[in-house]
Every structure is written in structure tokens, then in C-alpha cells.
Image: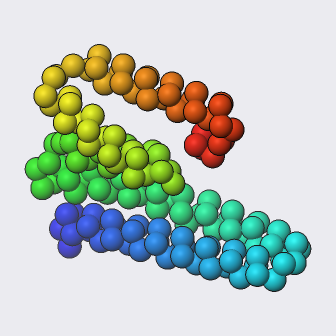
Amino acid sequence: MPWPEIIKWVHVLGAAVLFGTGAGIAFFMLMAHRTRDPAAIAHTARMVVIADAFFTASAVIVQPVSGFLLAWMIGYSVSDSWIVAALFAAEHGPYWEVGLVCGAVWNWWMGKTKSLGDMILTHAVANGALSAYVLVTGKWEYWM
């Protein structure tokens, strides 16, 4: 089997592992919480951490590596804006939509102005505004 096929299957398998373990972990945690038994919840949470460390963490590493390799093999540049926007989304955790939108807007602005200084300044202003909001409102979940 040629390398591109192998890498494609590794990428698909990584996606399946991420989806499957995410769904399975969510299901078992939900079932444990429904029992309202602290011992059962604690035991399930311990097992979830082990499953996350073993399956999810390895798939999280495999996905971007195989994705970059596939993109490179078909001729995309790593600097293509959609890859950068996807990385912005990935680093913003449960607020990935915000990261995706910001990544797309900042990529567009970077292409228009060719000014890295603009990107640094706007990112600093956005993070400063978020920091002020979190400190004033006490909504600490925005600081993952």
C-alpha cells in the first residue's frame, strides 16, 4: 500500500478513535451521574481519565500530524489560511467556533495588509478585553 493511502487510513482511524472515545466517555459519565452514587461517579471519572490519556491523547497527536502530511502530499502549503484557521479553532477548546472565526478574519486581514504587527496588536487587544471581561464578571470558564 502506498504511503498516501496509509497516512489517509491513519487519519481516518484517528478521527474514528476521537469520535468513538468522546461519545463513549460522555455516555459512561452520563450513566454514572444518573446513579447519583458518588463512588460510582468517582470510579467512572478515574476510568475516563485513563481512557482519555490513552486513546484521546494519542489520537489528538496523530490527527494534526497525519492531516499536515496529507495536506502537504496533495500540494497545500502549511501556510494556507484554512489550515491556520483550523489550528486557531483547535486551540480554543470548547469555544472552537470563536477560534475559527477569529482565525479566518485574521488570515483575511493578514493577506490584505501583510502586517504581522497588526495581528499581534489585535490578538493582544482581544485577549486584554477577554481578561477584563472575565475579571469583571467572574466567568472563569473563558480561561480554560
Q: Nearer the viewer, residue 137 or 82?
A: 137
Q: How is the image coloured?
A: rainbow
Please name the residue shown 48% across and 51% down the image. Answer: 95
Q: Is residue 20 above or below residue 2?
A: below
Q: Nearer the viewer, residue 63 or 107?
A: 107
Residue 50 lies in what quarter of the image?
bottom right
Measured as percent of width and height from the top left, residue 130 is found at 52, 32
Query: Left or right: 59 with respect to 144?
Result: left
Please name the residue shown 87% across and 78% down the image. Answer: 37
Residue reaching furthest to the left: 75
Measured as percent of width and height from the top left, residue 9 is found at 30, 71
Query: Left or right: 72 with respect to 33?
Result: left
Q: Is residue 125 above or below residue 71?
A: above
Measured as percent of width and height from the top left, residue 55 is found at 55, 66
Tally of numbered tags: 0
Query: Left or right: 23 with respect to 84?
Result: right
Measured as percent of width and height from the top left, residue 1 is found at 20, 73
**Taking the image as drawn, is residue 86 in sight?**
yes
Residue reaching furthest to the front: 137
Residue 14 lies in what quarter of the image?
bottom left
Q: Nearer the viewer, residue 50 or 128?
A: 128
Please name the residue shown 46% across and 72% down the image. Answer: 19
**Quarter of the figure with the C terminus:** top right
Q: Is residue 82 above or below residue 118?
A: below
Please name the residue shown 31% across and 57% down the image. Answer: 66
**Taking the image as drawn, is residue 84 in sight?**
no
